[in-house]
Image (cartoon, grey):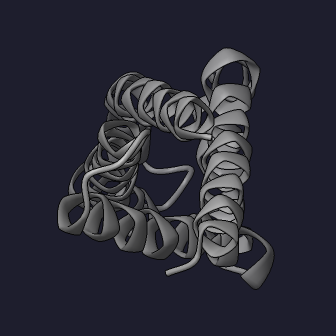
Amino acid sequence: MTSVTMFTLTAVAAIGSGLIGGIFFAFSTFVMAALRRLPAAQGIAAMQSINVAVLNPWFLGPFFGTAAVGAVLAVMALLRSGRGDAWLLAGGALYIVGTVAVTILFNVPRNRALAAVAPHGADGARLWADYAISWTAWNHVRTAASVAASAAFIAAL
């Protein structure tokens, strides 16, 4: 792979992980706080709507595209020994494990459980109280991992 291609892929990974980290940062710092201020039924309904709306190419493209580019960069870093390769490996690992795997293993199951409850039911209110705390805690992990991945890719440049 040429140095121009490696530079371009690294820049794409840095921008993508920074973009995703920014989205997660917004949720961690004010979106979830605003939803928790609403009555439980309204918070549930809003989050259910968000969880449907997020499944679009404008989010999923950068989310999974960054993972694909990060994986290619991590493999390239393992196959060669050059300046910045440790940063490429770290960036890829941070994004794939700390962002994508955490999403799949922790945030998505909570989203599915929330989608299955009626916003106005008693079960919904109980689930919402736990969801708002635990989902946000795992979102903090995704935020930190995405931002750290972006910093690692920038360091590799």
Where is residue 56 drawn, in percent x and y?
73, 81
Question: Looking at the image, which residue sits at the far right?
Answer: 58
Look at 70% across and 58% down and name the residue there.
50
Answer with the quarter of the image where residue 68 lies.
Answer: bottom left
Q: Which residue is depicted at the point 70% across and 54% down?
A: 11
Say left or right for 53 vs 2. Answer: right
Residue 80 position (above or below residue 23): below
Using the rendered image of the protein, determine whether residue 35 is visible from the camera's viewpoint: no
Q: How many marks?
A: 0
**Residue 152 point in image, percent of width and height:** 48, 32
Task: Please state the horizontal and vertical placement of residue 69, each as a whole percent of the image.
Answer: 50, 71
Q: Quadrant of the C terminus?
A: top right
User: Is 34 positioned to the left or the right of 121 in the image?
Assistant: right
Find residue 120 and report its horizontal and vertical position in percent.
55, 50
| Residue at image coords 38%, 69% | 116
Which quadrant holds residue 138?
Answer: top left
In the figure, is residue 119 to the left or right of 83?
A: right
Along the line of sight, the residue nearer the viewer: 60 or 29: 60
Front residue of this view, candidates 142 and 148: 148
Q: Looking at the picture, does residue 144 appear above or below residue 90?
A: above
Q: Nearer the viewer, residue 58 or 39?
A: 58
Q: Is residue 105 above or below residue 133?
A: below
Q: Is residue 100 visible?
A: yes
Which residue is rendered at x = 33% and y = 56% of the image?
96
